Amino acid sequence: MKDIYIAEVTNQRIIAFNKARARGEHMPFLSPAMMSAGTKSVRWCPKQQRNIFLLSDGERRFYLSKIFQPNVTSIKEQYPLDYTRTKEIADKLKVIHPRDHVTGKLQVMTTDLVIEYSDSDGSIYREACWFKPTLQDKNWTRTKQKCDIEKEYWKSFGVSYRQVIGKRSVSRTQADNIEMLSEYYDTHADNGELLKFTSAFLSSITEHPAYSLRDTLFDTADRLCVDTRRAYRIFANATLRQLLPIDMYLPLEFTEPVCLKA
């Protein structure tokens, strides 16, 4: 293979990423300062206990729909791929590897989200996710070439690769509900307390189906002899951990009854 050249600043970012990984930390390869304003966002993730950097509202929705699932242990965003390997794949596919149009130096490809799962049987596996707001892209042929490189890259590691098309693939209401509850997420929530609350909350709904969420929380708090603020915090954690079968596709309103999944 011919010598592969990358910019020195890119090399420094690779070194910084690898140092962070050696410390058990994830550092997104792309930073907010490198991107135009658009819909990018930096937000705190209470489950991962770090700031995350997402490039669009669609990524935000998808991230929120995944991160609190019980079997999801981590999500790494803007994950860099080994450029020597992606260059080999590009050559094999007979497509041009992403590069700087001025200098000709290679650009490091990144995967939008890499999700790590841990199932009840102890098995750990990953899923690489590529997000695209729309297929209506005038440069779709080139976009597909990059996607094919990425797909082959992850395939070589035995990692499944998923294409997520359109921000409507995840409901805005679902994402907003999760984001609202996530403010109360407790990494050390007691599972026994969550289960006890779930039982009392569902009993309250069964006995008083017309109660608003606020009234159901008041009633559940009385049943468990806890204050209402504490009851809401437990409600948030039980819902995020999917112990409470709340229909998250409908708005969570304190003044309206809670809708359960059918």
Image (spheres, grey):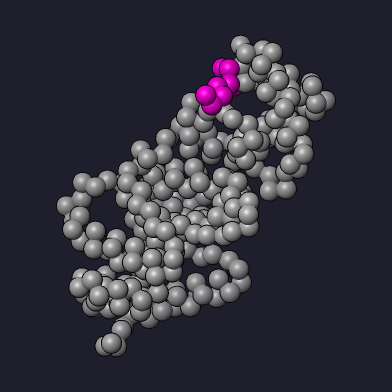
Would residue 74 be visible to someone looking at this image? no
Q: From the viewer's perspective, is residue 39 above or below residue 19?
A: above
The percent position of residue 159, horizontal first and vertical second, equals 44, 62
Residue at the limit of the structure toward the right, as seen here: 225
Q: Is residue 203 shown above or below 177?
A: above
Q: Quadrant of residue 215?
A: top right
Residue positioned 42% across, 35% down in the render = 171
- Tell me where the magenta segment starts and ends, as one range: 251-262
Q: Look at 31% across and 83% down and name the residue there.
A: 5
Task: Please name whichever residue, 121 or 108, is drawn nearer the observer in this view of the structure.
Answer: 121
Q: Nearer the viewer, residue 125 or 188?
A: 125
Within the image, what quadrant is residue 57 found in?
top left
x, y percentage for residue 164?
A: 36, 48
Left-right relation of 21 to 109: right
Instruction: State whether residue 35 appears in this view.
Output: yes
> What percent of the width, then of the height, locates residue 200?
74, 24
Residue 68: percent from left, percent from top = 57, 45
